[in-house]
Image (cartoon, rainbow, N blue to C red):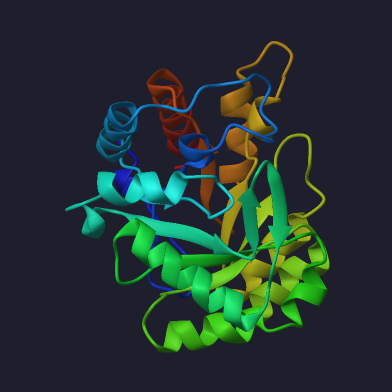
Amino acid sequence: MSLHKHYRTLGSTGMSLSPLGLGTVKFGRNQGVKYPSHFDLPSDQQIRNLLAQAQDLGINLLDTAPAYGISEERLGPLLAGQRADWLICTKVGEEFSNGESSFDFSAQHTKRSVERSLQRLGTDYLDLVLVHSDGNDLQVLDGEVYPTLQQLKQQGLIRAFGLSGKTIEGGIRALELGDCAMVTYNLNEQAERPVLDFALSHNKGILIKKALASGHLCVAGEDPVRKGLELVLGHDAVTSAIIGTITPAHLSQNVQAALAVLGSQE
């Protein structure tokens, strides 16, 4: 039972991603998050076990961010000696401290944020860096952050960049100017589908956030995970759906559901 044979290429980047990625917000933050119930942060050993399980299941994409509390700091030591086994996606733009988010899209902050992520994660390059938008997508993209990421890409510090946005217009602009976009798309929210359609026709990468509506999906009489993944993985633009969990059973169930969906699409 593995996703290995179902890897998808992220647009024109040449990077081959598992159709499910492991979201790590729960590794580092349990304040101000939109999950149905409270949770305690896992121990280092629990994270180590989950990473090993994810690898065995064929997952090669890790999604983290400075706004995910101490996620990056925890991942760095736990990934020692495994860098070649993972594609790491992190973010710039949003910070989270003292229970509150703040945003800074300046060139200076963008460079400093990437350098800090490299240090925390114990690596000399990042596979993917996304701009964590505050919702004003077009305004953010018209500023310094995208040109700065382009420079960092030319310097070899990042391999690809894009936007984790909140609007159709922002998603499309992000794809025109960058490599990929992270989009909300699930059974409850499909407003950003035009971004997926644009990506498909322009060979750009798409990552899906909230694929299972942050655990809020409910489908009468059917498996909500399978039904949710049928929608998400059924769109040819989608490279990978990010699923955040710290529960081994949930991780296994998610991969089983994805394999059932992918098998039925063949």
Q: Could you tell me which residue is drawn at 76 percent across and 60 percent down?
A: 134
Q: Is residue 170 left or right of residue 45?
A: right
Q: How many marks?
A: 0
Quadrant placement of the N terminus: top left
Vertical side of 188 occupied by 133: above or below: below
**Residue at the far front in the pictured view:** 98
| Rendered location of residue 3, percent (x, y) | 34, 41
Quadrant placement of the C terminus: top left
Vertical side of 3 occupied by 199: above or below: below
- For this rendering, which residue is in front, 88 or 2? 88
Q: Is residue 10 left or right of residue 83?
A: right
| Rendered location of residue 193, percent (x, y) | 75, 55
- For this rendering, which residue is in front, 80 or 18? 80
Q: Is residue 117 left or right of residue 176?
A: left
| Rendered location of residue 206, percent (x, y) | 58, 60
Q: Could you tell me which residue is drawn at 50 percent across and 88 percent down?
A: 151
- For this rendering, which residue is in front, 168 or 154? 154
Q: Quadrant of residue 156?
A: bottom left
- For this rendering, which residue is in front, 242 or 42? 42
Q: Could you tell me which residue is drawn at 28 percent across and 34 percent down?
A: 48
Q: Quadrant of residue 123?
A: bottom left
Q: Quadrant of residue 263?
A: top left
* Res 221 visible: yes
Q: Could you tell me which residue is drawn at 42 percent across and 75 percent down?
A: 158
* Res 236 visible: no
Vertical side of 143 occupied by 229: above or below: above
